[in-house]
């Protein structure tokens, strides 16, 4: 009996850490981090050459809270579907580690705190309005539509493309053509990105009742493949938008267009040979494209305004 006492202490001590990890998982940290990168680029472009570090930090904190709240409420809304899908069955809600009321309260408080923080910490309410719209569309429109129509991916691309607009509004005070150019890139980029993800997990999405395009296109995936390629081709065209509206100069165009063409080649290869290898190639390529384009915007769009 004496030897049993020490073994119970590590277990008890581990409980708070497990709970904290579960709450972090509810915020969808990887998605939130990716969104904050685009928020930062939007702010830097909108504010240049009047960058203020405190405003950027306020913007990232407020937008991060909104994104985290949206992620938690997405978990709450999709808890039953998650329980039926293998890749999500161990998430905090379907696994029973966090209760639905806890997740609901957690997400609502985070989102409200984020919008409120942006409204009070920044000199203009534009960023708070953009953040509120992003949250409302993501939670109230996109998430329920995933179980209704394949067009949910297109609808969901709207709130997914608004983070750089939040940043632009925080840095500039209002949305201009440059801000909408960023929105256009993010909007179109999400389509081939999420089509590749949905194809990889199409069986799971079917079990969860999600009407993603690859779920209704299960026979041979041809429609999914060529939709991915067409939207990647449209992205190549939209890639030039920041140059067209004066947000970035020639170095951006020279770097971004080959990057878009490289990504398009991956999407066409997936359309012609639809398997897990080519789908993962599109997914990885989409991430490389996004990081590359954001970096080029900073180098060729932001830095020249200071030097």
Image (cartoon, grey):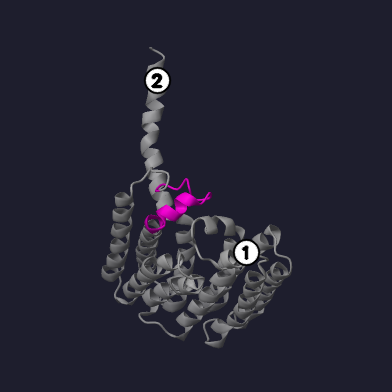
- Where is residue 2 drawn, in percent x and y? 38, 12
Give the mark toward the camera: 1 or 2.
1
Q: What span is in magenta?
A: 75-93
**Residue at the front extreme of this rendering:** 219
| Foreground pick, 231 / 69 | 231
The local crowd at label 2, few if under 14, some if 14 to 19, many if 20 or more residues have their Cα within 10 Å, is few
Image location of residue 282, percent across then percent down: 65, 65
* 297 within the magenta span: no
Quadrant in which residue 122 is drawn: bottom left
x, y percentage for residue 223?
A: 64, 72
The Cα–Cα distance between marks 1 and 2, rounded to whole angstroms, is 54 Å
Foreground pick, 17 / 82:
82
Residue that carries the numbered disc 2 in the rendered image: 6
The residue that mark 1 highlights is 218
Q: Secondary structure at mark 1?
A: loop
Instruction: Tell me if 304 is positioned left or right of 61 in this view.
Output: right
Numbered marks: total: 2
Residue 306 visible? The answer is no
Check if mark 1's residue and mark 2's residue have beta carbons within 8 Å.
Answer: no
């Amino acid at each position: 009996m004496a030897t049993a006492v020490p073994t119970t202490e590590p277990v008890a001590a581990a409980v708070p850490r497990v709970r904290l990890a579960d709450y972090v998982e509810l915020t969808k940290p990887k998605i939130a981090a990716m969104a904050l990168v685009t928020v930062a680029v939007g702010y830097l472009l909108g504010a240049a050459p009047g960058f203020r570090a405190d405003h950027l930090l306020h913007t990232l904190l407020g937008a991060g809270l909104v994104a985290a709240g949206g992620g938690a409420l997405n978990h709450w809304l999709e808890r039953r579907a998650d329980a039926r899908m293998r890749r999500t069955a161990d998430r905090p809600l379907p696994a029973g580690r966090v209760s639905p009321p806890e997740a609901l309260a957690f997400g609502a408080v985070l989102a409200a705190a984020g919008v409120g923080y942006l409204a009070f910490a920044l000199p203009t309410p534009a960023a708070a309005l953009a953040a509120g719209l992003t949250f409302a569309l993501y939670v109230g429109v996109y998430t329920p539509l995933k179980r209704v129509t394949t067009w949910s991916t297109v609808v969901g691309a709207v709130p997914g493309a608004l983070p750089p607009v939040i940043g632009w509004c925080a840095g500039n005070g209002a949305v201009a053509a440059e801000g909408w150019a960023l929105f256009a890139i993010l909007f179109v980029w999400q389509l081939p990105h999420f089509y590749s993800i949905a194809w990889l997990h199409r069986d799971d999405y079917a079990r969860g009742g999600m009407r993603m395009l690859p779920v209704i296109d299960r026979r041979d995936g041809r429609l999914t493949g060529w939709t991915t390629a067409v939207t990647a081709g449209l992205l190549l065209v939209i890639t030039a938008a920041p140059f067209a509206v004066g947000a970035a100069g020639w170095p951006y165009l020279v770097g971004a267009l080959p990057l878009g063409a490289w990504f398009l080649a991956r999407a066409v290869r997936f359309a012609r040979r639809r398997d897990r290898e080519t789908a993962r190639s599109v997914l990885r390529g989409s991430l490389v494209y996004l990081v590359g384009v954001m970096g080029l915007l900073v180098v060729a769009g932001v830095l020249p305004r200071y030097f």
